[in-house]
Image (cartoon, rainbow, N blue to C red):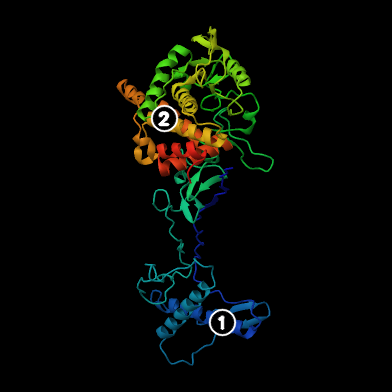
Amino acid sequence: MDSASSSSSPSSSSSYGVARVSHISNPCIFGEVGSSSSSTYRERKWKLMKWVSKLFKSGSNGGGGGARTNHHLPQFQEDENMVFPLPSSSLDDRSRAARAKEELDRAVSLSLADDTKRPHGYGWSMDNNPDFRRPFHGGLNPSSYIPPPYEPSYQCRRRQRICGGCNRDIGLGNYLGCMGTFFHPECFLCHSCSYPITEHEFSLSGTKPYHKLCFKELTHPKCEVCHHFIPTNDAGLIEYRCHPFWNQKYCPSHEYDKTARCCSCERLESWDVRYYTLEDGRSLCLECMETAITDTGDCQPLYHSIRDYYEGMYMKLDQQIPMLLVQREALNDAIVGEKNGYHHMPETRGLCLSEEQTVTSVLKRPRLGAHRLVGMRTQPQKLTRKCEVTAILVLYGLPRLLTGAILAHELMHGWLRLKGYRNLNPEVEEGICQVLSYMWLESEVLSDPSSRNLPSASTATSSSSSSSNKKGGKSNVEKKLGEFFKHQIAHDASPAYGGGFRTANAAVCKYGLRRTLDHIRFTGTFPL
């Protein structure tokens, strides 16, 4: 079972500029009015009033040179019941300008102390404010005095954000945060379709973001029969069937919903492809149909080439054994009448006949009509026994390589009987016959010698391979089918055919074919 999905939500937010605080038009000093100490408050207010009075006094002395008409300074009332007179003289003998500068410095210090209480990121800098560095001209004349910027313009101390998509500064616009990286909304792209991800949810594969649908298309398996996403089971897991060789994934329901399966390569029929239907009900895919052998006459050249293959390995068959292509029903009837032999169930595709029987063979190939093979002509044939082997029967309608593998297997049965190998147990007889079938397939597929599982096969020479090469060789499709038939032999689960082949194969690889056959003749078992 596979499941890959990963979903998360993008942390979407906006970058905000810090709002500017309004400038105050007149110089003010904000103290702690709500303090419990009234004496401190009165002291600060008294000093403030004193500083303001100096401004007025300077204005009346220097404002045009006229005579002063009012010698009394204004009084400042804190509330309705208290009046604080301004002191008439100062005990400080410093100059008036020095004292005014001291008061101004104190006011600036209080303002800066008040700035430290503001939230982080709000503030002003004397170094960056050109107005604060402006020189002070003239006396404390209100008409010429330029107030210091006690309420400056604040600067936003914003951390720079670099877009993970375009590698540019995001600025004050909207942005997305994901995987510890920031993105412009238009730069947060799906790794599959390259379009921006605008949905609230998306999927991640490692560090690559995807639309949920794009991620599903990439990772969620689709049924290769109905082409739908494979559904989840009751436990919420994706459950499917997969062919061990072709890797064809399909819904479990197609195993019992009467979906057609190729009788040769075992692949299920896809909904967008039509298989051919044989007269006996079997289905054949298009690739297997390309090289299918459908009558006895067409199979004769292949049969003789395999006999030549045996002769090239010094295993000549002295008797002329008849070979017939038959329908499934005729093959099953022949199996019932056969006393000897071990047959591969649930379906046998070949038989080495040793009893006299009348068998109906395919005389003329059927023709194609609306994805069906119709018009087959058959003929009953009386088989008489002239030696230990009466005839070899093979199921019709199979591709050339599979038909040849079956013939090579059945011919080995005939060779063993003609050479006097008696009373072998099924694992030994079927195992060594499967080895010869595998070796012939290997020579036909022309696989790389370094990847062969049977070193002894490299010593065999096949005239059928030579004739095939003269005709231009096999297509990649046919070679792939040959690899599949080899895979079937090597991974057969039955004790006789599968277990017997693996034991025989190990013996042949270790001792060679000739020594293995000699050991079987004398002991009836494989050499260890």
Q: Position of residue 173 (x, y in %)?
A: 47, 50
Q: Position of residue 456 (x, y in %)?
A: 38, 38
Query: What residue is rendered at 54% in x and 87% in y?
Result: 87
Quarter occupied by residue 317 = top left
On screen, residue 405 above or below 369: below
Counting every numbered tag in the picture gives: 2
Task: Choose between 5 and 521: the one closer to the eye.
Answer: 521
Disc 1 on helix, strand or loop?
A: helix
Query: What residue is rendered at 40% in x and 17% in y?
Result: 301
Check disc 2: other Cα within 10 Å, few if <14, some if 14-19, many if 20+: many
On screen, residue 290 above or below 480: above
- The residue carrying mark 2 is 440
Q: Answer whether residue 255 is visible to the viewer in this image.
A: yes
Query: What residue is rendered at 49% in x and 71% in y?
Result: 27
Q: Nearer the viewer, mark 2 or mark 1?
A: 2
Left of 175 or right of it: where is 461? left
How far is the residue under mark 2 from the one under mark 1?
A: 112 Å
- The residue carrying mark 1 is 44
Task: Choose between 110 and 310: the one closer to the eye.
Answer: 310
Task: Choose between 12 and 443: the one closer to the eye.
Answer: 443
